[in-house]
Image (tube, rainbow, N blue to C red):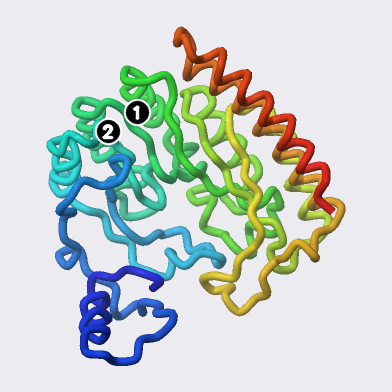
Amino acid sequence: MEGEAENVVGKIFRAALDGEDLPKHYETGVSETPDLEEIPDILQPSINGFVELGRGCCRGCEFCNVTLRPLRWYPLEKVKREINLNLKSGKVEGCCLHAEDVMLYGSKNTIPEDEKLLRLNEFVVKNCEGISWSHCSVAAVAAKPKLFSRLSEMILTRQSWWGTEIGIETGSAKLAKKIMPAKAHPFKAENWPEVVQEGMGLMHDNMMVPAGTLIVGLPEETEDDILKTMELIDDLKGVRSLIVPLFFVPLGRLKSEDWFRRAKMRDLHRQLLFQCTEHDFYWVDHLLEISFRGKWYGRFLRELYKGFAVIAKRKVRQIE
């Protein structure tokens, strides 16, 4: 099943109990998307303190299914109830705030709302042992650098760093303008590489560690687009981050396109993969250092990791 299940899953279970034929794949339509009041609170503690803030996205990227659904933000009281349920269970101490863009919690557009974000994160920091954000956009961070710094100061009273996932997707301004023009808002898509550098630079300065995804093999991607992405990754080598290249999967408005498969890889694609690998291994070593500093098992873990890194790098070089 693909999509939001609240208005659909009961019908599917009833059909199964009645012995009816079931579809192998069911995609929830827009008309079946639940309203806020139709989304219940969780009843049992969530895995790793995962707490949803809302659903949908206002960015409109063509390669994403989430943007096809309306944007809805949960009231802060609902979020607090779910966090408290996790904490009272005794099984969860930390909290992972989840949304397509946590930095836009409670906003009506692509500009973050100061008060709503500060109240949300203040509650989490006060009550939980640790905090992370599932997803965040570089554009929203770059739009409110002072707000982001205030959030960082708050969170770093609890921990030495915190993480999130971001979508870099491409270093090509041409591709960005074509398939994700609103991803740079409130900035221009033509300036996408600069927006990425600004947002990730702020994350570095404020001890947020992003895992940034790239989409390899986007439709109509040219060698120049790949080179632009490689240039961007090179510009980011001083930024504390992990960069994860992913093959293009046809979703959203691009679901009729072909999958990108290994057989389609060019030499430049291979160079890009190795470039990302080198970047990631450099920064993982740094993250291990700051995460386990002062702990007796830190040295052992670093040595174990270094052995793994040698093997992984060799495997990457063997990609044909």
Q: Which mark is on residue 151?
A: 1
Label 2 sits on what residue type?
Answer: Asn
Residue 220 placement (x, y as % from top left) = 74, 68
Q: Residue at x 21, y 83 (%)?
A: 14
Alpha-carbon neighbours of circle 1 within 10 Å: few (<14), some, or many (≥20)?
some
Q: Where is residue 61 in the image (x, y as percent from the top left)?
A: 53, 62
Q: Are marks 2 and 1 in contact (CB under 8 Å)?
A: yes
Residue at left offset 34%, top offset 47%: 98
Camera-nearest residue between 217 and 168: 217
Q: Around disc 2, counting alpha carbons within 10 Å, would you say few (fewer than 14), some (14 to 19), or many (20 or more)?
A: some
Relative to the observer, which residue lies in front, 316 or 115? Answer: 316
Q: Which residue lies furthest to the right in this view?
A: 267
In the picture provided, is 245 more to the left or to the right than 263? left
- Looking at the rendered image, the quarter that the C terminus falls into is bottom right
Residue visible at 54% across and 74% down in the picture: 253
Of mark 2 and mark 1, the one earlier in the sequence is 2
**Apparent side of residue 151 relative to residue 205 in the rendered image (left or right):** left
Residue 65 lies, in percent from the top left, at 47, 67
Q: Is mark 2 on a helix, strand or loop?
A: helix
User: Quick check: 125 above or below 85?
Assistant: above
**Total tally of numbered discs in the picture:** 2
Q: Please name the residue that numbered disc 2 is placed on.
A: 121
The three-letter code of the residue at mark 1 reads Leu
Q: How far apart are the two marked residues, 2 and 1, measured between alpha carbons?
A: 7 Å
Identify the image quadrant of residue 135: top left
Q: Where is residue 194 in the image (x, y as percent from the top left)?
A: 64, 40
Q: In which quarter of the image is residue 265?
A: bottom right
Front residue of 223 and 15: 15
Identify the residue shown where x is 48% and y is 24%: 207
